[in-house]
Amino acid sequence: MTVATLAVSAQPLSTIAADVLVLGVLKSKEGPQLQTDDPALQHLHASLIAIGVTGAQDEVVRVPSGLRSIASVALVGLGSATVSPDTLRYAAGSAARQLRGIESLVFGFPALDDDAVLAVLEGAGIGAYAYTSYRVSSLAGTTLPATHITVATATENDALVERATAIADAIHTVRDLVNSPPNDLYPETFADAALSLSEHADVTVDVLGVAELTEGGFGGILGVGLGSTRGPRLVKVSYAPSGAARHIALVGKGITFDSGGLSLKPPASMIGMKYDMTGAATVLAVTLAIARLALPVRVTAWLCLAENLPSGSAMRPNDVITARGGKTIEVLNTDAEGRLVLADGIAAASEEHPDAIIDVATLTGAAMVALGTRYVGTMGDPALAGQLVAAGDRVGETLWHMPIAAELRPLLASDLADIANIKPGNTAGGMMIAAAFLREFVGTNGEGADEKSIPWAHLDIAGPANNGGSGWGFTGKGPTGVSVRALIELAEEISRS
């Protein structure tokens, strides 16, 4: 889905031509409060209660405008909180998501500074999304979101438009890739998509096929991909601007379909397992957005791509595989495969000695048990995890710092190998156990007395990566693009340090 054309305008609100004018309504004890001072729109104040407007979040009520330049007005609830960038982003996204079958929107929100304008642009750009690639006979009856969005503001800053467009495009990229069906998106075609998306970006892309993975000792990715006739890939996307002083490595889990392998999932649990490549889609989109914004920080994304299927050639429980770098892993459950491909990616990323490694993965169902479907489990180096949580707070993303308890690593002891991929029968702390496994593959920087583990953080996005219910804010049903904005914000922070 192409991002809607975003723009800002300093023209008087009632003179900007559009199909729908979007105004915010604040919920208060005194009743709904329309957030506009435009004299041409004052007649709407008196009718809010009569037409059922309350100002609640996600409420959208559309009425005739009474204006020549605009056909109708959409009154969008801002909720009862203080008006802030988060409030405006949410409401703009909700409006753009719900208002369909029109071509243009103009937002008359109380956006008085750059942060507020960016929030409205971002929310609207993200919310105006539809995936129609596989609609044929039903396409004609599908109502689509607006293709042109304007924010009325005295702050005519084109840099805000470019930033919001880059962020919305990154999230739409994740959504498009995750929405793609697994018969069309598999490791080889995912790698092709990465090459295509990177064609005009300031990045280089290297794709390792089965032969290169075998030669490089990537036993985790190869092992997971053994059961499929469509072989695995490792895609490396590198952005290295001149003069960049800091280097971030992003590692993404890219299981294009997860049947569980020989540790087969129940049939109902396989539905939706095309989403298991969301981490790889995320790190790709984030890297391309950082390059588009020309942030002065080096970023390397590692997309660990495999299809986990059962067959006569599939990896078996009790197999021992050798990950990149030589560490051996006893595989006790082939459905704990994401950590195996990430082990290779983290080890390879460590060899370049970056300043930080962050992996992103739909890794464990335990993450949803612990944190529900709106919070991202954030584990690893305390300082880096704290930076990520703070970055999320600044852009309105909910990350939550979780520990990796010291008693968990011994559960992964193996009688045969250096480490096992699970503890059979254990049901406690599954999200943290997976993180304890991944930490074993993080390398070091420095030598001798100065040798230290590379700062590393693990984002388990299993819960919020996909919205299975009704929409809210700029989040529709399906893939969400969660953590994209927090990672871009973190990269910008690190580029300044």
Image (spheres, rainbow, N blue to C red):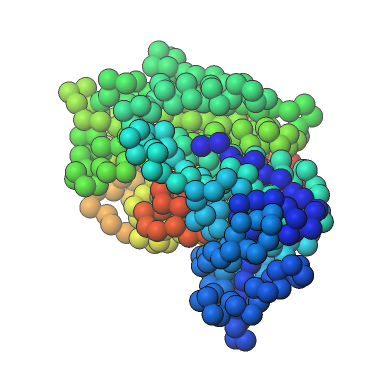
Q: Quadrant of the C terminus?
A: top right
60 and 241: which one is in front?
Answer: 60
Instruction: Tell me if 485 is positioned left or right of 334 in this view.
Output: right
Q: Identify the residue shown where x is 21% and y is 47%.
A: 268
The percent coordinates of residue 283 (x first, y second) are 54, 37
The percent coordinates of residue 14 (x first, y second) are 73, 59
Q: Is residue 99 above or below residue 247?
A: below
169 and 326: which one is in front?
Answer: 169
Q: Is residue 361 above or below residue 84?
A: above
The percent coordinates of residue 428 (x first, y second) are 32, 59
496 and 48: which one is in front?
Answer: 48
Q: Identify the residue shown where x is 51% and y is 37%.
A: 1
42 and 136: which one is in front?
Answer: 42
Residue 449 position by quadrant: top right
The answer to whether residue 458 is seen in the rendering is: no
The answer to whether residue 298 is seen in the rendering is: yes
Residue 487 position by quadrant: top right
The percent coordinates of residue 270 (x first, y second) are 25, 42
Q: Identify the residue shown where x is 35% and y is 60%.
A: 369
Q: Identify the residue shown where x is 40% and y is 13%.
A: 211
